[in-house]
Image (cartoon, rainbow, N blue to C red):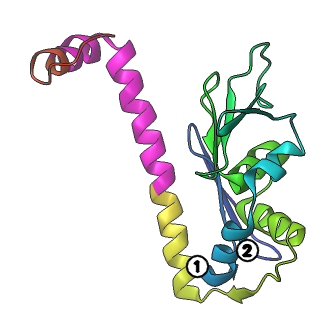
Amino acid sequence: DLVRSRGLGDVYKRQAKGWGIIAIFADMIDRETVDRIYAAANIVDIIGEYVTLKRKGVNYQACCPFHNEKTPSFVVSPSKGVYKCFGCGKGGNAVTFLMEHENITYPEALKMVAKRYGIEVKEKEMSEEEVRRNDDRESMFALNGWAADYFANYLHHETEGMSVGMAYFRQKRGMTDA
């Protein structure tokens, strides 16, 4: 569902199943600053503040902070700058980790990383046209997320979807149930 809360910063938030939270602010962090933040972010240091990482070859492993597990399935790759949990499927970079773990927005996570590495955050105000364009874009993401869920549910749980749709995928596309 699309939630629009107007106030200081004109925040637009959308929560769609499988997409997470996307927030767009009327005051944007400029691209150059975002690039410097990503270049400075050390994913091992940032994630290491939340979980105990153990080196396994070129990567690091830990028990996932997003779900309960006994055997480590959470892998951090410093060379790629990404993490992935093979148990729950969550993955991303240092910024998306902070967003997920701290339940904060993208700009808040960027500012958190910037503060850690002493990077000054420069923001610019979006024009009315940029705000409208981003609002339209977010509406399309919400609609697309809803449509994807609707048709996946129809394909897997409705009689017609299972008979016609799944038959098409098996016969014409060579897909299997595996």
Q: From this viewpoint, is residue 26 visible?
A: no
Residue 158 seen in this snapshot: yes
- Rendering quarter of residue 30: bottom right
Q: CA distance from mark 2 to mark 1?
A: 9 Å
User: Crowdedness of circle 1 by 10 Å Cα count: few (<14), some, many (20+)?
Assistant: some
Seen from the viewer's position, the closer of residues 107 and 56 is 56
The residue that appears at 66% across and 33% down in the rendered structure is 57
In percent of width and height, residue 89 lies at: 59, 29
Task: Give the image location of residue 138, x and y in percent.
Answer: 53, 61
Front residue of 123/140: it is: 123
Query: What numbered label is drawn on residue 17?
Result: none
**Residue pushed farthest left?**
172
Image quadrant in which the C terminus is located: top left
Q: Position of residue 32 (x, y in %)?
A: 63, 83
Q: Position of residue 135 (x, y in %)?
A: 55, 69
Magenta stretch holds residue 162: yes
Q: Which residue is mark 2?
A: 10
The residue at 63%/86% (across/down) is 126
Q: Which mark is residue 131?
A: 1
State if disc 1 and disc 2 touch (CB < 8 Å): yes
Q: Is residue 57 above or below residue 34?
A: above
Query: Which amino acid, by three-letter code, is at mark 2?
Result: Asp
Seen from the viewer's position, the closer of residues 19 and 139 is: 19
Q: Secondary structure at mark 1?
A: helix
Q: Earlier in the sequence, mark 2 or mark 1?
A: 2
Which one is in front, 110 or 49? 49
Q: Which residues are magenta?
A: 141-167
- Within 10 angstroms of label 2, few (less than 14), some, or many (20 or more) residues? some
Looking at the picture, which amino acid does disc 1 mark?
Val
Looking at the image, which residue is at 36% across and 22% down? 154
- In the shown orientation, is residue 12 left or right of residue 111? left
SS for tag 2? loop
